Image: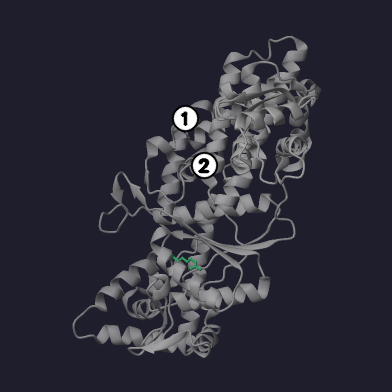
Amino acid sequence: MELSDIVKEAFGKAYPGEDFGGVRVLPATDPKFGDYQCNDALKFAKKAHANPREVGAKVAEALKGNDVFEKVEIAGPGFLNLTVSGGWLNAQLSALDSKPACGIPQKGAGKKIVIDYSSPNAAKQMHIGHIRSTVIGCAIDRIFRSLGYDVIADNHLGDWGTQFGILIKGYRELLTDEERENLTVANLEKCYVLSAAKAKEEDGVWKDACRAELVKLQQGDKDNLALWKRFIDISIGEFDRMYAKLGVKFDTYRGESYYNDTMPGVVAKLQEMGLAVESEGALVVNLEAEKLGVAIVRKSDGGYNYTTSDLACVKTRVEEYDPERIIYVTDARQQLHFKQWFSIAAKMGYTTKLVHVPFGLMSYQGKAISTREGNLIKLDELLAEAKRRAYDIVKERGGDETLAEQIGYGAVKYSDLSHDPITDIDFSWDKALALEGNSGPYLQYAYARVCSLLEKASGGADRDGSFLVATPAEKRLALQLLEFPGAVVRAAEAYKPSVLADYLFQTAQLYSSFYQSSPILKSEPSVRAARLKLCALFGKVLSMGLGLLGIDTPRHI
Ligand code: ARG
């Protein structure tokens, strides 16, 4: 039985007939208050106009004779400080150890969700700014899958829009034959920049020509469609190369263009429902009542926009998958866009839970990342640099390139995931690759160290013993390990992989204090076996947790 249920039952015994559904037992904020605490005697006393310490005393009395708690104390104005018994703790550890996936509850069984992340714009190289949606989205994806959800990871590529007129015109006239033949995303990007600059020329000739190419594309012109398709294929090929390095996999790659045919119907429905009205030639939905301004759903030139495409996309996803929720991971500058169209979707009758997970800006060495600053580092270069720097560190220990990738990419990912997504972060090589402190390599080393300890301990024989928590350092680590499933649930509920990262870092710190204060291999057999069990469980939890963050856990570093 869960601790909360045990204490709930005691409340019921002390005060029959009352509702104690909300009673919660939480880990103690400080070990001096015991192992766990419960603050509900206070809440109940307020409601029942009773003396909180008396309520606490009655509940403590009802908990007597229970073999879960070794000690129940009433502190301050009625807090219950709970100390668990060794027997209970050992049994819990062994239950956690034997459960699949370290006890992560399968809350999502039978539920489908869509996660829309990474979603870069085609024909542009991915740069350092794209790392956040990809890495945060991938971690949220893995966390939800671990909870048993049926996740559809969709890469909503920006693969439609005016830029394709500019690109097609540029491709035809500004690239060399050689560049056209060996078309790369880098060439496409160059072609876009050159063509866009020409489109700014005063006579407007180039701009009109780009526009004409766009119209041809939109009308289904065979040549332009084939070119567009080629640009998209090349872009996806390049993106996939990055995803392979980052260990990211999508179930679908449905770009904005996928919804082209659905948009007119959505707009017609908005008009029919009286939600969209004409304004200066455009069609708009007025959201002033919710202080969300006005959202354009059809531009005055008849074209659709980002809002229209997201509305068409939600219609398709709901009809096709009927998901329990849809999660969108994008930068925080898109918050108004999501608020606007979430509100329109609700008015249209969509009841699916729509969640926007916004993340802050990434800067580099204190400067915003922008073309103008000249620090728009390509993702490819960032990963190459991470690998190079990690290689410098691991080669002294005989590490190879694969290890350098695991450490380097892990460092880049963790330096992002260890922050609450909404905060702005400044990327720093020194911090990311630090071997001490809250970094990816620190946690990977902790894992490798525990693996080598277990190997040294002569295989599995020692681990067949049972858990036997005795010292305070063992107990703190043990209590922390029991919190793993809860940390995964909290990370999912908050859509913050950082909750899990924090948990893992704290766990590694408690492991390190335990390790420093407790001899293992040289202890007498029963202590040695019990400590090895704890080490093995720590290794299991750490590697499972890092895996959920998309970080590899090499056994040897
Ligand atoms: N392509 C957009 C960007 O680069 C992100 C798309 C996010 N997904 C969505 N359904 N709006 O910012």
Among all residues in the image, which is located at the extreme left? Answer: 202
Classify residue 504 as left or right of residue 8.
Answer: left
Task: Give the answer, above or below, for where 328 lies relative to 373.
Answer: below
- The numbered disc on residue 250 is none
- Residue 177 figure quarter: bottom left
- Residue 306 figure quarter: bottom left
- Residue 376 figure quarter: bottom left
Question: What amino acid is found at the position of numbered circle 1 in the picture?
Answer: Leu
Residue 334, given in percent of the width and then of the height, sits at 41, 64
Q: Nearer the viewer, residue 13 or 440?
A: 13
The colour style of the image is one colour
Q: Can the viewer see residue 247? A: no
Q: Nearer the viewer, residue 557 or 501?
A: 501
Classify residue 63 as left or right of residue 239.
Answer: right
- Which residue lies at the image location 76% right of the left edge and 45% below the top edge? 17
Residue 538, given in percent of the width and then of the height, sits at 65, 30
Residue 483, given in percent of the width and then of the height, sits at 64, 36
Q: Residues within 10 Å of mark 1 (few under 14, many from 20)?
A: some
Question: In the rendered image, which quarter contains the N terminus?
Answer: top right
- The numbered disc on residue 410 is 2
Task: Give the answer, above or below, for where 215 lies relative to 371.
Answer: below
Q: Which residue is mark 1?
A: 435
- Label 2 sits on a secondary structure element that is helix
- Label 1 sits on a secondary structure element that is loop
Question: What amino acid is found at the position of numbered circle 2 in the picture?
Answer: Gly
Q: Give the mark nearer the N terminus: 2 vs 1.
A: 2
- Which residue lies at the image location 35% right of the left edge and 81% below the top edge? 169
